[in-house]
Amino acid sequence: MCHARDDLGSWDEKRSLRWLNLAVARTVILVLGVALVLAALFVLLRPNTPATGPQTREFDPRISGNNMEPSDFTVTEGDRVVLRITADSPHEVHLHGYDIEREVAPGEPAELSFEADLTGRFTIEDHETEEELGTLVVEPR
């Protein structure tokens, strides 16, 4: 009878080992599947990274009365920004956040040139009348 018990014990051990191997295989497959899903989500949901470095962004807005066209400018952090502003009447243009001011006279364009090193939304206004003329948006790189 001892021999029969050894056979039965061997069979139970084999069954236990098969069950253990199956559980390990399922766990490995589950972990690999989760890792694959997470990697795919990372690739799909990561923020767009610019392919190029800082650029020079040039704009030529015109002030007519108290309106500037174009009035909104979007650049990326690190870009060199050049605003060449013309006007039909005298204005003192002020770019908040960067604290840049220039006098603009008819027939004499003013140039605001700077590196966009601060991110955010910045108002461009006529400093004398405090009228908002436009907005500069600097997006993070």
Image (tube, rainbow, N blue to C red):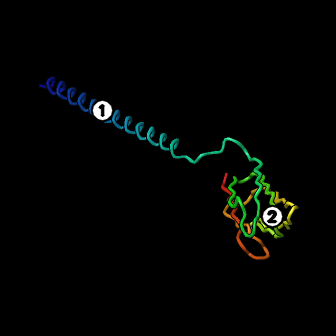
In the drawing, does residue 83 fall left or right of residue 51?
right
Quarter holding residue 84: bottom right
In the drawing, does residue 30 fall left or right of residue 75?
left
Q: Nearer the viewer, residue 14 or 72?
A: 72
The answer to whether residue 27 is visible is yes
Pinpoint residue 100: horizontal percent, then vertical percent. 81, 66
In the drawing, does residue 73 fall left or right of residue 8?
right
Residue occupying the point 25% across, 32% down: 16
Type of the residue with mark 1: Leu
Badge 2 density bin: few <14, some 14–19, many ≥20, Cα 10 Å: many
Residue farthest toward the left in the current orientation of the protein: 1
Residue occupying the point 55% across, 46% down: 46
Q: Are marks 1 and 2 in contact (CB under 8 Å)?
A: no
The answer to whether residue 96 is visible is no
Pinpoint residue 64: horizontal percent, then vertical percent. 75, 65
Pinpoint residue 22: horizontal percent, then vertical percent. 30, 32
Badge 1 density bin: few <14, some 14–19, many ≥20, Cα 10 Å: few
Type of the residue with mark 2: Ala
Q: Nearer the viewer, residue 131 or 76?
A: 131
Q: Which mark is residue 22?
A: 1
Figure check: 40 above or below 3: below
Q: Nearer the viewer, residue 66 or 24?
A: 66
Figure check: 98 above or below 19: below
Residue to which mark 2 is pinned? 87
Quarter holding residue 7: top left
| Alpha carbon distance from label 1 to label 2 | 78 Å
Residue occupying the point 44% across, 40% down: 37
Q: Secondary structure at mark 1?
A: helix
